[in-house]
Amino acid sequence: MFLGEFTHKLDSKNRIMMPSEFRDDLSEEFYITKGPENSLVIYTKDEFERQSLRLDELVNENKKNRAIKRLFFSSTIKTSLDKQGRVLLNKNLRDYAHIESEAMIIGNNLTIEIWDLDLWQEYINEVEVNLSDIMDD
């Protein structure tokens, strides 16, 4: 289970330190893909396999389903942590998430999300203002 918020900076080689609290639960390989609201989502190997099976169940004759599958799989990279606990974010993912220097890494139960720090602040400020309404729905 991934929990908490952690601010980290990209280094000069576009690597970002993964919080030590998350490292043990990431196996030798894991997956990063584009997520909602210009975030990046990290899936453990097991969770990626579960997500892949769910997507495989979508009817391929449906245009929306084909688009979802194409976007998900084409934007996903398989990666691992280096010896210092860093992960490389490629240009495609960095550009999508607007990450240039500082990022917020958050635990979201079974996944990890990486956000541009400013986008995260904007998002969380908007959500917190409407928290009562969101919880009521």
Image (cartoon, helix red, strand yellow):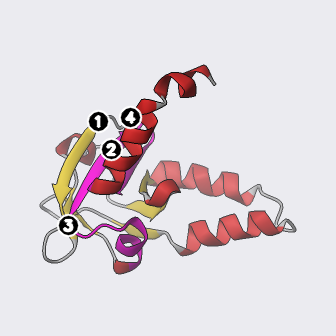
Q: Are marks 4 and 1 in contact (CB under 8 Å)?
A: no
> What type is the residue that disc 3 sits on?
Ser
Q: Is residue 114 magenta?
A: yes
SS of the residue at dot 2? strand
Q: Which mark is residue 101?
A: 3
Q: Which mark is residue 106?
A: 2
Q: Which range is magenta? A: 92-117
Q: Residue at x 43, y 61 (%)?
A: 31
Tell me which label, 2 or 3, sits earlier in the chain: 3
Q: In front of the other: label 3 or label 1?
A: 3
> What type is the residue that disc 2 sits on?
Ile
Residue 63 % position (x, y) = 81, 69
The quadrant where residue 84 appears = bottom left
SS of the residue at dot 1? loop
> What type is the residue that disc 1 sits on?
Gly
Q: Are marks 1 and 2 in contact (CB under 8 Å)?
A: yes
Q: In front of the other: label 4 or label 3?
A: 3
Q: Which mark is residue 4?
A: 1
Q: Is residue 123 left or right of residue 6?
A: right
Q: Residue at x 58, y 66 (%)?
A: 72
Q: Is residue 92 left or right of residue 83?
A: right
Query: 73 above or below 102?
Result: below
Query: 23 above or below 127?
Result: below
Tell me which label, 4 or 3, sits earlier in the chain: 4
The quadrant where residue 108 appears = top left
Tell me which label, 1 or 2, sits earlier in the chain: 1
Q: Real-space Cα distance between discs 3 and 1? A: 20 Å
Q: Are marks 4 and 3 in contact (CB under 8 Å)?
A: no
Q: Real-space Cα distance between discs 2 and 3? A: 16 Å
Q: Real-space Cα distance between discs 2 and 4? A: 11 Å
Q: Are marks 2 and 3 in contact (CB under 8 Å)?
A: no
